[in-house]
């Protein structure tokens, strides 16, 4: 019941701001499409750049939307509305509160991915997005919702959330196999970037879209990030409860 209560709160918030959320989802990816595809025309491995860009753009959108759905709101609720204090004294199990937040953020990311898939449908050509692709995108959303939850617990004030976006989300948006391949990066940097969750998601979704198999290693890495984030979140809440 606790998970459903949190999801219901997210649903009410989503319905209230549906127009704003949808428009904000569309603007940045459309700008990237215009700049990187129409303004900079080239191909990768003999294929149109659209075939490389669109899977990366969809994966990146799940990251930014899932992260954004949690980071700012949870920071403000924790620091100023004292929402966590209310959760502590309520009968809602803390693990259900955590899962509800993470699933709600991931569903927001999945909604964003569907919007981008609709917008890019005339440009996708032979690209295929299967239920497995959607599952990987949902898992990616879970990972970044968890990361947002952890960072919101670490925030000292409401201005920390935008900083986290600048320090973490923006660099990954450009470096993690989204717009350009990591193959030409220097050794050391390349290996580090390739184990980041967005890099794994982009690679798996792109492989599936082009008729290749997804990497089991990528799924394992995403699950590892998710489990680590959930453990850290739970430790924070249970420690606070026992203070």
Image (cartoon, rainbow, N blue to C red):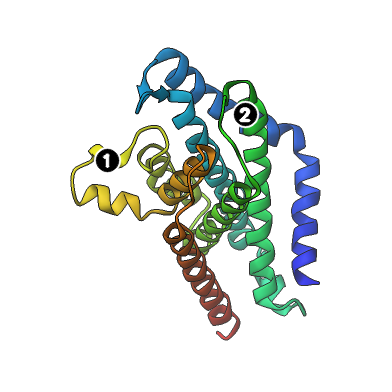
Q: Which residue shows up at 67% across the image and 38% down it? A: 114
Res 26 label: 2
- Marks 1 and 2, Cα distance to the nearest angstrom? 29 Å
Q: Is residue 33 left or right of residue 25?
A: left
Q: Which residue shows up at 61% across the image and 26% down it? A: 120
Residue 18: x, y in percent?
Answer: 76, 37
Q: Residues within 10 Å of mark 2 (few under 14, many from 20)?
A: some
Q: Which residue shows up at 43% across the image and 24% down it? A: 49
The outermost residue toward the left is 187
Q: Camera-side residue: 153 or 214?
A: 214
Q: Residues within 10 Å of mark 1 (few under 14, many from 20)?
A: few
Instruction: Evaluate whether residue 108 shows in this view.
Output: yes
Q: Which residue shows up at 63% across the image and 53% down it? A: 106
> For the C terminus, which image quadrant?
bottom right
Does residue 217 sit above or below 159 in this rendering? below
Instruction: Evaluate whether residue 81 shows in this view.
Output: no
**Which numbered disc flags the more N-terminal residue, 1 or 2?**
2
Res 183 label: 1
Quarter holding residue 102: bottom right
Local SS, label 1: helix
The outermost residue toward the bottom is 242
Residue 8: x, y in percent?
Answer: 80, 57
> For the N terminus, which image quadrant?
bottom right
Residue 190: x, y in percent?
Answer: 26, 47
Res 97 label: none
Q: Camera-side residue: 149 or 115?
A: 115
Q: Is residue 212 left or right of residue 193?
A: right
Local SS, label 2: helix
Residue 11: x, y in percent?
Answer: 78, 51
């Amino acid at each position: 019941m606790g998970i459903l209560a949190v999801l219901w709160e997210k649903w009410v918030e989503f319905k209230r701001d549906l127009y704003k959320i949808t428009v904000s989802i569309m603007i940045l990816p459309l700008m990237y499409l215009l700049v990187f595809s129409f303004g900079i025309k080239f191909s990768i491995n003999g294929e149109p750049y659209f075939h490389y860009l669109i899977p990366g753009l969809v994966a990146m959108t799940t990251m930014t939307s899932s992260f954004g759905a949690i980071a700012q709101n949870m920071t403000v609720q924790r620091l100023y509305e004292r929402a966590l204090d209310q959760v502590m004294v309520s009968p809602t199990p803390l693990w259900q509160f955590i899962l509800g937040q993470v699933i709600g953020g991931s569903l927001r990311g999945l909604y964003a991915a569907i919007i981008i898939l609709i917008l890019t449908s005339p440009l996708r050509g032979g690209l295929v997005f299967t239920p497995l692709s959607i599952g990987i995108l949902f898992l990616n959303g879970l990972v970044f919702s968890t990361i947002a939850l952890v960072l919101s617990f670490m925030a000292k004030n409401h201005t920390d959330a935008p900083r986290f976006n600048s320090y973490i989300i923006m660099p990954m948006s450009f470096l993690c196999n989204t717009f350009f391949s990591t193959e030409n990066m220097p050794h050391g940097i390349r290996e580090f970037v390739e184990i980041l969750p967005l890099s794994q998601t982009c690679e798996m979704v792109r492989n599936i879209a082009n008729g290749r198999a997804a990497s089991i290693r990528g799924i394992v890495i995403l699950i590892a990030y998710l489990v680590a984030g959930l453990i850290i979140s739970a430790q924070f809440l249970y420690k606070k409860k026992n203070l």
